[in-house]
Image: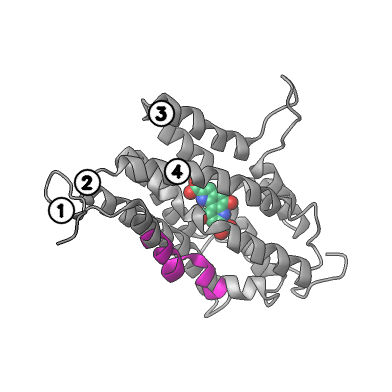
Amino acid sequence: MSANPEPRDPAGETLLSAAELEARLQQIGRERYHSLHPFHKLLHGGRLNRGQVQAWVLNRFYYQSRIPIKDATLLSRCEDLELRREWRKRIEEHDGWPAGAGRERNEGGIERWLVLAEAVGLPRDYVVSTEGLLPATRFAVDAYVHFVREKSLLEAVASSLTELFAPKIHEERIAGLLQHYPFANERTIAYFKRRLKEAPEDVKFGLAYVIREARTRAQQEQVLAAVRFKTDVLWAQLDALHHAYVEPGHVPPGAFVPEGPQEWQASA
Ligand SMILES: O=C(O)c1cc(C(=O)O)c2c(n1)C(=O)C(=O)c1cc(C(=O)O)[nH]c1-2
C-alpha cells in the first residue's frame, strides 16, 4: 500500500497531478499541433510561391482579427478580477495602444500582421475586408469565438493553451521565412518576434489558472478536450489552404485568386 494514495475528486475519480495534466497537454501538442501540417512544412521550407504565401497571410489575418474579439468575449463573462486584469493584456497586445501615460506606442499585433500582408503584395484594404477569405477559415475561426462564448470559463481559458506550443513554431517560421523569402526582414516578421515574448507570459498565467481551477477529473478532461478542439480549429484552417492553393487547387467561389507572376522577385 502506498503511503500517499492517489488524490481523488469528490466523485471518487482519480485526479491528475499538475505535472500529469501538463504532460497530457504537451502530448496533445506533439500529436496534433498545426506545426505538423504539410502546409506549414511547405511554408517554412521555402516551398510556397507568392500566391500561396499571400493566401496564408490573408486567411490567417482573420484569425488575428478575431483573437481580441474572442478575448473580449471571455472578459465579458468573467467575474474574477484577477483573471480580467491579466486577460485584458491580450486585447492590448493585438490591438495596440497610443503613446502616453509613461508607455511607448505599441502598434499592436494586428497592425504588425498588416505590415506583413503589404510586404507579400496584398492591398491592406482587401485583407481587412476579409472578402477573399476561404469559407472554411471563417467557419473554423468563428467556431473558436463561439466556443469561448458558450463553454465554461475554464474551457474558454484552456482553449488558449495551444499557445504552449506556439513559440517553437514561431521560431521555425522566423528562421524559415528569413532564409527563403525575399519579403522577410526584421520589419515584416516583427509579428512573430514579438509573440516570442508575449506568448510565454500569456500561457504561464493560463496554465496556472487551469491547473488551479480544474478541481475534478471531469474538469481536467474538459481542459484537455478544449485544447484538442483548438488544435482542430488550427488544423482545419491549413487543410482549407492546402486544398485550395496547393493540391488539388480548388479555390472556392469568391475566394482569393492569386494574380501575376508567382515566382518570388528579389525585390518582392
Ligand atoms: O502562429 C501560430 O502558430 C500561432 C498559433 C496560435 C495558437 O496556438 O492558437 C496563436 C498564435 N500564433 C498567435 O500569434 C496568437 O497571438 C495567439 C493567440 C491565441 C489564443 O488562442 O488566444 N492563439 C494564438
- Give the mark nearest the N terminus, 4 or 3: 3
The amino acid sitting under disc 3 is Ser
Residue bounds of the magenta highlight = 24-39
- On residue 206, the disc is 4
Is the CB of the residue bearing disc 2 within 8 angstroms of ligand 1? Answer: no
- Give the mark nearest the N terminus, 4 or 1: 1
- On residue 13, the disc is 1
Question: In the displayed structure, does residue 240 sit left or right of residue 215?
Answer: right
Residue 101 coordinates in the image, percent (x, y): 71, 19
The amino acid sitting under disc 4 is Gly
Quickly name the residue at label 2: 216
Q: CA distance from mark 3 to mark 1?
A: 32 Å
The magenta stretch spans residue 231: no
Quickly name the residue at label 3: 76
- Give the mark nearest the N terminus, 2 or 3: 3
Q: Nearer the viewer, mark 4 or mark 1?
A: 1
